[in-house]
Image (spheres, rainbow, N blue to C red):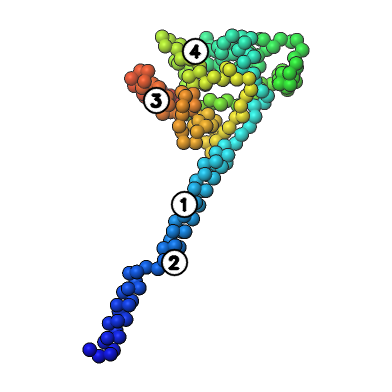
C-alpha cells in the first residue's frame, strides 16, 4: 500500500471517530437551550394567565354601593324587589318607583350611599344605571317564570349565588370584545366551576336541564 493510500485511510478513520464521539461543548449548549426554553415558556404562560384577564375585562364600580343584607332584613325576601309582573314577565332590576315605595319622602342620606341615591337619582327623578352581572346576550331569552314557579321552583341562589348575603357591591367586569359580563363565563379563566352559580354559560343550562328533565332542551326554547 502506498503512503498516499495509507494516509487517506487513516484520515478517514480519524474523521469518523471525531464525528461519532460527539463534542461535550455541543451537549452543554443543547441542555442550556432546553432549560432556557422551558423557563421562557413558564414565564410567558404565567404572565398570560395572570395578565390576560386584566387585559380582556374592564372593571367598573356600581353607581353606589347596595347593601343586600340590609334590604333583605327590611323586606324579608328577594321577590319584593325582583318580582314577576301579572303577565308573567320578570321585573328585573328595581325601578326608582319601586324603590320609593319604601324610601318615602322623609329626608334620606344617613349613609354616603343613601345620600348619593337621594341627591343624584331621587331628586333628579333619574333611574339608577345599575350594571347587571347576569345580563344575557340579546339573542338569548330567559324565562324567570319557568324557573321559579311550578312544581319544582328553583331557588334564586342556584344561579345568582348568595348575593342576598352581601353587604357590598362587587365591581362589574365586562368582556372588552363581547360586551358580556364576566359572570357569564365565570371568574375561573379555565372555565372550571365549584358551584352552580359560578358561571351562566349555555352548557351549564343544558346540563341542568338534562339532570332535571332528562333532556337538555331545544335551541328555540332559549334562542329567539
The Cα–Cα distance between marks 4 and 3, rounded to whole angstroms, is 23 Å
Front tag of 1 and 4: 1
| Vertical relation: 176 (above or below) 87 | below
Give neighbour class at mark 3: few <14, some 14-19, many 20+ (Cα, 10 Å).
some
Q: Where does residue 167 sit, x and y in percent of width and height?
A: 63, 20
2 or 1: tag closer to the N-terminus? 2
4 or 3: tag closer to the N-terminus? 4
- Whether pointer 1 and pointer 4 mark residues with C-beta atoms closer than 8 Å, the reply is no
| Callout 1: SS | helix
The Cα–Cα distance between marks 2 and 3, rounded to whole angstroms, is 59 Å
The quarter of the picture where residue 170 lies is: top right
The Cα–Cα distance between marks 1 and 4, rounded to whole angstroms, is 58 Å
Q: Does residue 124 appear to the left or right of 217 in the view shown?
A: right
Q: Does residue 174 appear to the left or right of 202 in the view shown?
A: right
The quarter of the picture where residue 114 lies is: top right
Residue 168 appears anywhere in the view: yes
Badge 3 is on which residue?
206
| Vertical relation: 182 (above or below) 28 | above
Q: Does residue 8 appear to the left or right of 32 in the view shown?
A: left
Amino acid at each position: 500500500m502506498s503512503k498516499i493510500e495509507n494516509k487517506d485511510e487513516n484520515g478517514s478513520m480519524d474523521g469518523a471517530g471525531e464525528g461519532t464521539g460527539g463534542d461535550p461543548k455541543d451537549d452543554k449548549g443543547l441542555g442550556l437551550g432546553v432549560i432556557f426554553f422551558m423557563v421562557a415558556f413558564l414565564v410567558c404562560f404565567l404572565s398570560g394567565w395572570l395578565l390576560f384577564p386584566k387585559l380582556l375585562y374592564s372593571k367598573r364600580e356600581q353607581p353606589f354601593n347596595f347593601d343586600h343584607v340590609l334590604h333583605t332584613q327590611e323586606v324579608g325576601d328577594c321577590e319584593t324587589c325582583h318580582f314577576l309582573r301579572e303577565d308573567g314577565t320578570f321585573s328585573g332590576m328595581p325601578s326608582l318607583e319601586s324603590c320609593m315605595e319604601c324610601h318615602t319622602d322623609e329626608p334620606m342620606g344617613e349613609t354616603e350611599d343613601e345620600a348619593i341615591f337621594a341627591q343624584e337619582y331621587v331628586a333628579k327623578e333619574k333611574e339608577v344605571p345599575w350594571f347587571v352581572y347576569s345580563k344575557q346576550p340579546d339573542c338569548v331569552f330567559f324565562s324567570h317564570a319557568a324557573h321559579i314557579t311550578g312544581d319544582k321552583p328553583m331557588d334564586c341562589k342556584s344561579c345568582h349565588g348568595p348575593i342576598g348575603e352581601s353587604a357590598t357591591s362587587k365591581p362589574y367586569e365586562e368582556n372588552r370584545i363581547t360586551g358580556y359580563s364576566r359572570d357569564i363565563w365565570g371568574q375561573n379563566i379555565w372555565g372550571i366551576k365549584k358551584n352552580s352559580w359560578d358561571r351562566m354559560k349555555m352548557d351549564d343550562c343544558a346540563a341542568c336541564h338534562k339532570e332535571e328533565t332528562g333532556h337538555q332542551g331545544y335551541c328555540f326554547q332559549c334562542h329567539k
